[in-house]
Image (tube, helix red, strand yellow):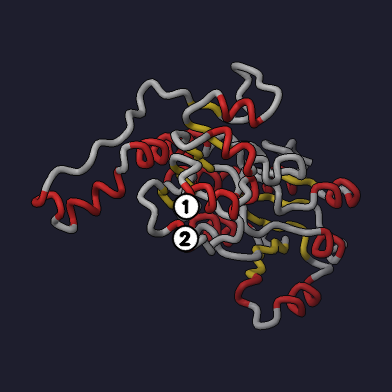
């Protein structure tokens, strides 16, 4: 397979890059001085793309690669890949579901605990020497709180607004689609209320970010734990000074074990395709 050209737009995992290099001729787009010309020069030889949650393949790129057969994404979310164009062109698409579920769930719980028990602020309190001047203030209990997320099947709520009004912690973990873009808007945030906590481990565009910032600054929302943002790596600076907000750098699946498992699944899908075997995790 070392003669198969695979386009790797940007580095995301050193282990993945290492394993790709062992098997394919990897075209590392980020190393090219002129990326547009680089793609044009290799357009008739590229048979696969390995993308990730931040970089995928839009319709223009897919259209420009006549030999493209498969896009293997180092992610679960597929919002960076034009699936409609892939179906139209007969391009197969895979992702890396399930292997990262535990890590992302851990992060959701960690964020909720950190926000409600003010763990980050408490850490700063100790490091700054403030503890010597008195105990840290009381926080909010996590155990016993009602936690919901929009796609859970345990209890049906007809609207996200009603869902938010019935829980203490709202976890956003659904796929980003046209329907779920800004699914968390002002109305939902107000329904969650000044004692509610929003946790976002999905995609930044699930949340109307300016409305979230306003609600936190005005005290209309109790707190937020965020792993994703609308314009990563840019984060609204108004959030930096808020003790009821915990910010992570899109690290939900960021453990060595899980990133290696994701890479292995990416590689396995590519190998299956080029050996004419069934794909392990097909999307298209």
x, y (%) of residue 73? 66, 50
Hey, which residue is sitting farthest bottom in the picture?
33
Answer with the quarter of the image where residue 264 lies.
top right
Mark 2 — residue?
Answer: 238
Hey, which residue is sitting farthest front in the picture?
218
x, y (%) of residue 63? 87, 62
Hey, which residue is sitting farthest right in the picture?
88
Position above or below: 148 against 234: above
Give the SS element for disc 2.
helix
Q: How far apart are marks 2 and 1 (CA)?
A: 8 Å
Residue at x 41%, y 48% (from the top left corner) = 245
Position above or below: 228 against 232: above
In front here: 137 or 124? 137
In front here: 66 or 210? 210
Position of 3 compared to 67: left or right? Answer: left
Hey, which residue is sitting farthest left in the picture?
132
Residue at x 61%, y 56% (from the top left corner) = 230
Residue at x 71%, y 49% (from the top left corner) = 79
In front here: 50 or 153? 153
Mark 2 and mark 1 in contact? Answer it, CB < 8 Å. Answer: yes
Mark 1 — residue?
Answer: 217
Answer with the quarter of the image where residue 76 lies.
top right
Give the SS element for disc 1.
helix
The quadrant of the rendering that contains the C terminus is top right
Q: Residues within 10 Å of mark 1 (few under 14, many from 20)?
A: few
Q: Residues within 10 Å of mark 2 (few under 14, many from 20)?
A: few
């Amino acid at each position: 397979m070392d003669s198969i050209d695979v386009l790797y737009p940007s580095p995301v995992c050193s282990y993945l890059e290492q394993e790709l290099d062992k098997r394919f001729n990897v075209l590392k787009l980020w190393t090219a001085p002129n990326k547009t010309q680089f793609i044009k020069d290799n357009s008739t030889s590229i048979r696969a793309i390995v993308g990730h949650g931040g970089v995928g393949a839009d319709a223009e790129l897919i259209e420009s690669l006549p030999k493209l057969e498969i896009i293997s994404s180092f992610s679960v979310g597929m919002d960076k890949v034009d699936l409609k164009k892939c179906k139209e062109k007969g391009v197969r698409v895979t992702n890396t579901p399930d292997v990262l579920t535990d890590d992302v769930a851990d992060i959701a719980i960690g964020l909720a605990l950190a926000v409600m028990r003010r763990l980050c602020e408490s850490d700063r309190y100790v490091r700054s020497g403030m503890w010597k001047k008195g105990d840290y203030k009381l926080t909010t209990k996590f155990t016993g709180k009602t936690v919901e997320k929009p796609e859970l099947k345990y209890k049906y709520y007809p609207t996200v607004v009603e869902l938010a009004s019935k829980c203490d912690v709202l976890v956003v973990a659904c796929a980003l689609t046209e329907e779920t873009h800004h699914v968390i808007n002002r109305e939902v945030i107000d329904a969650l209320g000044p004692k509610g906590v929003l946790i976002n481990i999905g995609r930044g565009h699930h949340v109307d970010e300016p409305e979230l910032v306003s609600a936190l600054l005005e005290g209309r929302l109790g707190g937020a734990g965020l792993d994703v943002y609308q314009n990563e790596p840019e984060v609204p600076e108004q959030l930096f000074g808020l003790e009821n907000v915990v910010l992570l750098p899109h690290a939900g699946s960021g453990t060595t074990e899980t990133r290696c498992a994701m890479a292995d699944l990416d590689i396995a899908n590519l190998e299956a395709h080029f050996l004419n075997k069934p794909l392990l995790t097909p999307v298209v």
